[in-house]
Image (tube, helix red, strand yellow):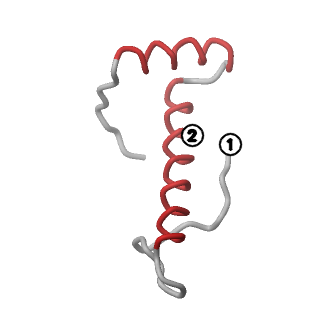
Amino acid sequence: MKSISLKLQDPIFQDMEKLLETLETSRNNYINEAIEFYNAYQERQLLVATPAGRVGFGSGGFDGSITGI
């Protein structure tokens, strides 16, 4: 697992904190799920924009599943 430093805009942070109270999940888990979801979205966008038969992202790729939703 990797550690990162992250600066969020105040309104985004405040919205997240409100949601975390309701969702009863950790901030770390919430951010991991958000990044996983956004990565899957971006990878799908690359597949749509890439000519047939060519993968538009690096090794490892995307297995088509989105967990935690």
Q: Residue at x 51, y 62 (%)?
A: 45
Q: Amino acid at mark 1?
A: Gly
Q: Residues within 10 Å of mark 2 (few under 14, many from 20)?
A: some
Vertical position of residue 53 compared to residue 45: above or below: below
Coordinates of residue 37 in the picture (x, y in percent): 57, 47
Which residue position holds label 1? 68
Q: Give the camera-side residue of 26 and 53.
A: 53
Vertical position of residue 50 compared to residue 67: above or below: below
Coordinates of residue 36 in the picture (x, y in percent): 53, 48
The label number, if any, that marks residue 25 in the structure image: none
Which residue position holds label 2? 33
Element type at marker 2? helix
User: Left or right: 31 with respect to 19?
Assistant: left
Q: Residue at x 43, y 46 (%)?
A: 1
Q: Splitting the image into 4 quarters, where does residue 30 fall?
A: top right
Asked if disc 2 and disc 1 are in contact, CB closer than 8 Å, the reply is yes
Vertical position of residue 65 compared to residue 50: above or below: above
Q: Amino acid at mark 2?
A: Glu
**Does label 2 or label 1 sit earlier along the sequence?**
2
Element type at marker 1? loop
